[in-house]
Amino acid sequence: MKSILVAIYKIFLIPHIFVYKLSKNRNKIDMDIERWASVKGMNMGKNALLLDFLANSPDFRTIFYFRTRSLISHILNLYCRKQKNFIIDITTKLGGGVITGHPYCTILNADAIGDNFYVNHLVTIGEEKGKRPTIGNNVSIYTGAIVIGDITIGDNCIIGAGSVVTKSIPDNCTAVGNPARILNKK
């Protein structure tokens, strides 16, 4: 019965495909779809994957609506709701291939976040004195971490759970603790 309801729901999601096809951020959405499919071990056509992620993942919908901001997206959000407690600041430059680990109460408010970003729940990326972080490519930020201020997180970094990062982290590092310290350099 549940699979029948999901199939019917996906029919109502078809307008999202048109929004996707017309989006100026289609290449970033493609990167998101490919990364989600890889992590979940799914192998279907892009449109089928898009509908599946929209039907089953409010956090994916949040990223999708962020990338396709328009009146139509706002209307679609009325019946296909995004994750209510996952906030991406409208001015954040967000690279493609974003994946989330149930980002409940997560705020992304950075100048820029690179490609292949992973974020977990209860993460705050935000400003301090009006200055926001810049985050490189292939960065993972885990549960409860706080990254604030005019700092840079380099490429290929891991920010451990509960870390408070207020100073820049170079490429290829793992940072943990409060205040964050570099645990190792890859």
Image: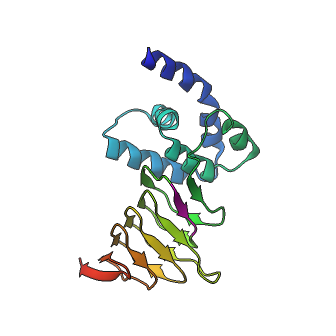
Which quarter shows the C terminus?
bottom left
107 shown above or below 33: below
Q: Position of residue 85 (x, y in %)?
A: 56, 52
The residue depicted at 56 percent of the width and 24 percent of the height is 9
Q: Which residues are magenta?
A: 105-109
The residue depicted at 59 percent of the width and 81 percent of the height is 128
Q: Position of residue 179 (x, y in %)?
A: 38, 82
Q: Position of residue 89 (x, y in %)?
A: 63, 63
Residue 15 at least partly seen: yes
Q: Which residue is more in the foreground, 112 or 168?
A: 168
Q: Which residue is more in the foreground, 81 or 91?
A: 81
Q: Main secondary structure of the magenta part?
A: strand
Residue 116 at least partly seen: no
Q: Is residue 82 left or right of residue 144?
A: right
Farthest right residue? Answer: 71
In the figure, residue 119 lies in which quadrant?
bottom left
